[in-house]
Image: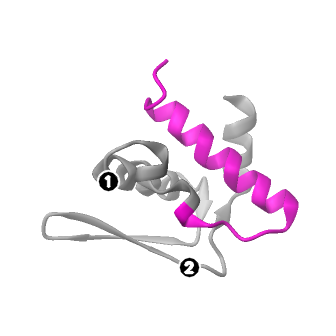
């Protein structure tokens, strides 16, 4: 599997978020941005949007505007969910 495959990126994001949860630290979106992950912006938005839609993460709002989606993060409540932890453990 390539380092930019969907499942690899999902596991990187969820693993980081789970570590933050266990350490009692807030998730820093900048540490998992597209540049850091080495993927295009629209691919990153796609992944984060689907993580939110599948209830693997919470605290992000995905809105469609002309030309694509935009993401808004709630810094006080951006976290992995129990479903995200389960996904991480199964994959």
Label whose residue precedes the other's in the sequence (1 or 2): 1
Residue at image coords 55%, 65%: 29
Residue at image coords 72%, 71%: 26
In the image, is residue 17 part of the stretch drawn in magenta? Answer: yes
Residue furthest to the right in view is 23
56 up-or-down from 5: above or below: below
The answer to whether any part of residue 50 appears in the image is no
- Circle 2 sits on which residue? 74
Q: Which residues are magenta?
A: 1-30
Q: Position of residue 8 (x, y in %)?
A: 54, 32
Question: How much space separates mark 1 and mark 2, taking CA atoms?
Answer: 19 Å
Where disc 1 sits, the SS reads helix
70 up-or-down from 88: above or below: below
Q: Is residue 25 left or right of residue 75?
A: right
Q: Is residue 63 left or right of residue 73?
A: left
Q: Position of residue 74 (x, y in %)?
A: 56, 79
């Amino acid at each position: 599997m390539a380092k930019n495959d969907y499942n690899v990126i999902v596991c990187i994001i969820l693993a980081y978020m789970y570590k933050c949860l266990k350490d009692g630290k807030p998730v820093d979106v900048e540490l998992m941005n597209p540049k850091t992950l080495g993927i295009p912006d629209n691919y990153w938005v796609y992944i984060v949007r689907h993580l939110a839609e599948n209830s693997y993460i919470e605290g992000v709002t995905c809105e469609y505007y002309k030309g694509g989606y935009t993401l808004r993060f709630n810094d006080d409540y951006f976290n992995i969910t129990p479903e995200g932890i389960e996904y991480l453990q199964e994959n």
